[in-house]
Image (tube, coloured by chain):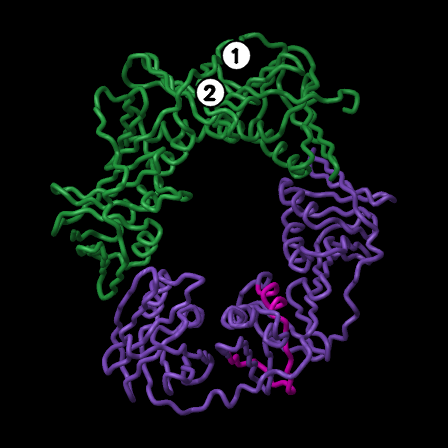
Chain colours: A green, B purple
Amino acid sequence: MKIICEQHKLINSINIALRAVSSKTTMPILECLIIQAESDTIKLIANDLEIGIETILEGNIVEPGTIALNAKIFSDIVRKLPDSDVTIETDDNYKTTITSEKAEFTIYGFSGDEFPYLPKFEKTDPVVLSQFSLKEVIRQTVFSISDSDSSKIMSGELFEIKENNLKVVALDGHRISVRNIELEDNYDHIKVIVPGKTLIEISKILSGEIADEVNMYFTDKHILFEFDQTIVLSRLIEGEYFNISQMFSGDYETKVSINKSEMLRCIDRSTLLVKETDKKPIVFNITDEKIEFKMNTSIGSMSDEINISKSGKDMLIGFNPRFLLDALRVIDDETIDIYFINPKAPCFIKDEEETYMYLILPVNINAEVY
Amino acid sequence: MKIICEQHKLINSINIALRAVSSKTTMPILECLIIQAESDTIKLIANDLEIGIETILEGNIVEPGTIALNAKIFSDIVRKLPDSDVTIETDDNYKTTITSEKAEFTIYGFSGDEFPYLPKFEKTDPVVLSQFSLKEVIRQTVFSISDSDSSKIMSGELFEIKENNLKVVALDGHRISVRNIELEDNYDHIKVIVPGKTLIEISKILSGEIADEVNMYFTDKHILFEFDQTIVLSRLIEGEYFNISQMFSGDYETKVSINKSEMLRCIDRSTLLVKETDKKPIVFNITDEKIEFKMNTSIGSMSDEINISKSGKDMLIGFNPRFLLDALRVIDDETIDIYFINPKAPCFIKDEEETYMYLILPVNINAEVY
């Protein structure tokens, strides 16, 4: 194989493919990037058996062929080359020479015969949305997937498409995050669970531009994302997702409107007093015109207050401050509405159109202390 | 004690004093910052028994007094407060209330009676230089102090003042870094060894501005740096520094002039092939018009070449690439001169005026391989 390409294009393609390179594996071939130069197309390919990525690299094929190179060594070398033409040439023993200007590196590759290439995938009827929307919806929900291994289903996100709506749900037993996105077209009903890891990796390589599109294709076992010069194929998580509709009843006792940034800063400060080993709630004392916030830990105590507008009953309720922070950080609205039922029931942060709904379970508190 | 000060001024002072807070200690008092409010001056004080820092905080003293607060907790809280007036008030039990706008934190402090305050220091005849010069000279030498505990003297830097010259030397047995700075005034002869740790910490709080000055005061045991609203007191390292003058003879066999940036990039790339466990040299093959660079390791091999102008003999010589990189990174000249004696003797990188001299020992190489 012999190819010539520009250093900055090569490093861009490498950075995309690297997201599917296995870091912890007993199979050295999974630590490799494949360079495949055939029929006028150069592809970089990586696959950690959960996610596979193929991305097209612009360049000249002098001699077609395939080589597997250790992804870390190869990417480190290319990253430090001058931004100039890079020639990659292999011999029959997979010895690979990487040349740029007068600098020449020689490293040892593999045949790539054992590499788990991505299966053929029938691409029909894509669901289309902007890269901006997909990247945003991942950022706005993925923090509430479960990071424990106890539930495979909680480690993924529900992607449910109905007519022209994409609903994305993530939950971990303490909270539920829901986002609804309006799509340009109408689609048949699709309901799948996408691994959180896939979503985290893909959000790192999406451009985030409104003008750039992503096509999503679905089969029983897989989801395929296609965008720019890249495809990302991921297994789906099998099983039935939780039925969350009954969790979001319309009833509430107390509704509060509050400035989001003020609340975020207040709760952020309170976490300074929280040690890993000594999890304490932040307590809301909700009265007619304000919420008083209080926290007491072994380190010390804090209190603060924020003016609100409120309808319904007064309430004393406690929360894990981290769960509140996670939700507040991804809401763009400057004033938010929070709905409370009682001190033992979850609160909801949501907008009227329900483009976002964050449900957070409270923490039991000893009301007499506050 | 009760004081009121602005949040951004308080956090600036905390950031300075934090550099002398002990992170690993069995004495909780050394993890504290002292706030001392007396005779119209608020000071923040920290001391890890190697370095002590006192810095003046602008603010109002409502009630004089002293409090010791855990530096990490106190600084974390202040950092997250709004940029507004902060009130710090203590009671008889050292309970400390930190208030800003409606936010109020309460933490538990200590009396500060056990704190090792900085000794009185007679400030006479300062050596004066700009904060820029001191910060630069530390950056340009401190990488070559020894980080092993085997030699106390090698863990410090020589500061030698003669007439209007400050010479700073750092060495670790493989290399020597020397910088000479011209001072505005003439001084009596001073020769001390300053701990590397002191210099690293102080360079983090120096402004780096040419217009800002530092006063340095010396006693047998201590050096005191005075700048802005801050004093930094450090122990000196006792003992006789190495006599390096005979190392820098004027003789050489080969002199090379080379583009520094090209050489830096070339050597930087070569280090990609170096594993921690498998230290290999970069080999220079110096001929009339160019240096060929080569490296061979278990990962692979590289070669590169750079045009030079040269006088004297051809030479084949090997170096630890890291030592070259450290020196090249802190030299501002775009073209540098390197002097070689023979493949077993150190090379020198120096300018004609000897404002900088970097001596680097070569590595034995098997000449037949290259």
Q: Which mark is residue A360?
A: none
Residue closer to the observer: A266 or A185: A185
- Residues under numbered marks 2 and 1 in contact, where contact means CB atoms less than 8 Å apart: yes
The residue sitting at 78% across, 55% down in the picture is B36
Residue A2 vs residue A262: left or right? Answer: left
The answer to which quarter of the image holds residue B280 is bottom left
Residue B107 vs residue B302: left or right? Answer: right
Q: Does the magenta segment cover residue B194? A: yes
Q: Does the magenta segment cover residue A321? A: no
The answer to which quarter of the image holds residue A235 is top left
- Chain assignment, label 1: A
Does dot 2 land on a helix, a strand or a loop?
Answer: strand
Q: Which residues are magenta?
A: B179-203
Quarter of the rendering occupied by the C terminus of chain B: bottom left
The residue sitting at 40% across, 18% down in the picture is A167
Residue closer to the observer: A309 or B48: B48
The residue sitting at 24% across, 31% down in the picture is A119
How far apart, in angstroms, are the residues tagged by discs 2 and 1?
Answer: 11 Å
Identify residue for label 1: A248
Does dot 1 land on a helix, a strand or a loop?
Answer: loop
Q: Is residue B269 above or below residue A192?
A: below
Residue closer to the observer: B247 or A315: B247
Identify residue for label 2: A178
Amino acid type, callout 2: Val
Q: Residues within 10 Å of mark 1 (few under 14, many from 20)?
A: some
Tell me which numbered mark, 2 or 1, is placed earlier along the sequence.
Answer: 2
